[in-house]
Image (cartoon, rainbow, N blue to C red):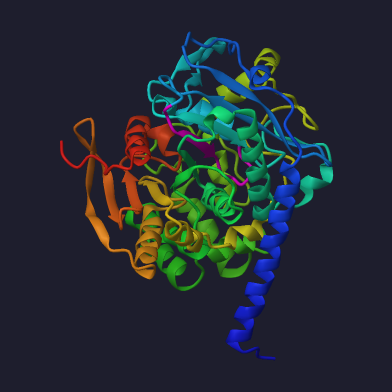
Amino acid sequence: MNIPKMICQQLFLTSESFTMIAIIIIVLAQTLVGVSSLPEADKISNLPGQPQVKFQQYSGYITVDDQHQRALFYYFVEAEEDPASKPLVLWLNGGPGCSSIGVGAFAEHGPFRPGDNNVLEKNDYSWNKEANVLYLESPAGVGFSYSSNKSFYALVTDEITARDNLVFLQRWFTKFPEYSNNNFFLTGESYAGHYVPQLAQLIVQTKTKINLKGIAIGNPLLEFNTDFNARSEYFWSHGLISDSTYEVLTKVCNFSSIRRQIQNGNLKGVCATVNKQLDTEVSNYVDEYDVTLDVCLSSVNQQAYVLNQLQETQKLDVCVGEKTTTYLNRKEVQEALHANLVGVTKWTTCSEVLHYNYQNLEIPTIPILGSLVKSGIRVLVYSGDQDSVIPLTSSRSLVNGLAKEIGLSTTVPYRVWFGEKQVAGWTQVYGDILSYATIRGASHEAPFSQPQRSLVLLRAFLEGKSLPGVI
């Protein structure tokens, strides 16, 4: 039976409205319960092996569901200088199901990176040089975050994640009220292309009193077909696959079809054939998250592997990441972090208990970016240009298409930007509120592979300034 388009739209809007009302009621109910612990109880006196620093660190738990004892773990580092006047940045890693502390804090842009002999080394390009940075392990089941009710892990959705993250923020600000008026920014990468816009949208819709100024997302999943299918041209243009394989991927069975079939457990026919050919041509000796990298894979890339999942079986080598895993599994480190292992025997980079609803990958979040822009929230999408998992071409075309759709004119034409007297990437700005940038030589995890350039990008974004355009 054919339902007229107008009736379909009305049904959709009605359903959406009821869902939104339900979420708002749940969130308000959760936040009525006060947070009894004090920030001083979460203060980190010293992490084992860390160098001396002057800024303060905090970590601990925020309960987001009292009835089912669901709690999210955070790690908070104050800005190196004058934290009271610096913005607050929340960072979320992707997966879905990977740790913002293990990846973001200890492998990308936190103040320390695990070195040899259980010693932490100072990161010269830590983001807390520019902001107070809050790392959140989300959803429950990731890292040290947990749910006492194990049935929660059976099927976690974007909607649940956004709701829990909002409750976390509301209760975190109750615990740290001195930061409630600071400019607030949401940031993340990979599947945070869902986490970040959806959380920002919920903040706006619920009219939560958070001083949200902007969001920045790196190599983000924004639109399933566009992002996945951009891989074929990226592989071909970089010489990773043959002309014949490229032709099959563009005319017979594309990457999004391969992903769906593997996800549903029914990879077969021509899709199975071309997938095997991909394995042969690309090989297991190229890091798809940085196609120029000729060193061993790091577990920092496990979050991207969860999103990639095009090979039926694959083992990742661990290099830098194994030091983080070893460090965070030390008992004295967990004690210093006020962290507990609940329902798991060890801390892992990506969750081994969480079952995420992979159908959510196909929820387009590019329209949410449009609604945020219309609400006055600044949006930055950036790409490490050596990533083939979410290639720069898909992100750039999606942002450009969004600008045209919502009627934003170009205010900064496509041009190079600089860092340390070198071309650091390319950028384009629309309406002084929506912007796109590449980070030259960066991987899927841009701050991991290009920390200095990523810090320049962050600084400009937080200050609302254009990226450096002259040497």
Is residue 195 among the parts visible in the rendering? yes
Locate the N terminus by quadrant. bottom right
- SS majority, magenta: loop
Is residue 355 among the parts visible in the rendering? no
In which quarter of the view is residue 143 placed? top right
The location of residue 160, given as percent across then percent down, is: 69, 51
Q: Residue at x 66, y 67 (%)?
A: 17
Magenta stretch contains residue 443: no
Asked whether, in this view, residue 164 is left or right of residue 308, the answer is right
Viewer-side residue, 409 vs 180: 180
Report the number of discs.
Answer: 0
Magenta stretch contains residue 88: yes
Asked whether, in this view, residue 31 is left or right of residue 457, the answer is right
Q: Is residue 439 above or below residue 8?
A: above
The location of residue 401, given as percent across then percent down, is: 37, 66
Q: Residue at x 40, y 33 (%)?
A: 449
Viewer-side residue, 274 vs 51: 51
Give the residues drawn in magenta, as a range: 85-98
Locate the C terminus by quadrant. top left
The location of residue 55, given as percent across then percent down, is: 48, 16
Q: Residue at x 63, y 52 (%)?
A: 312
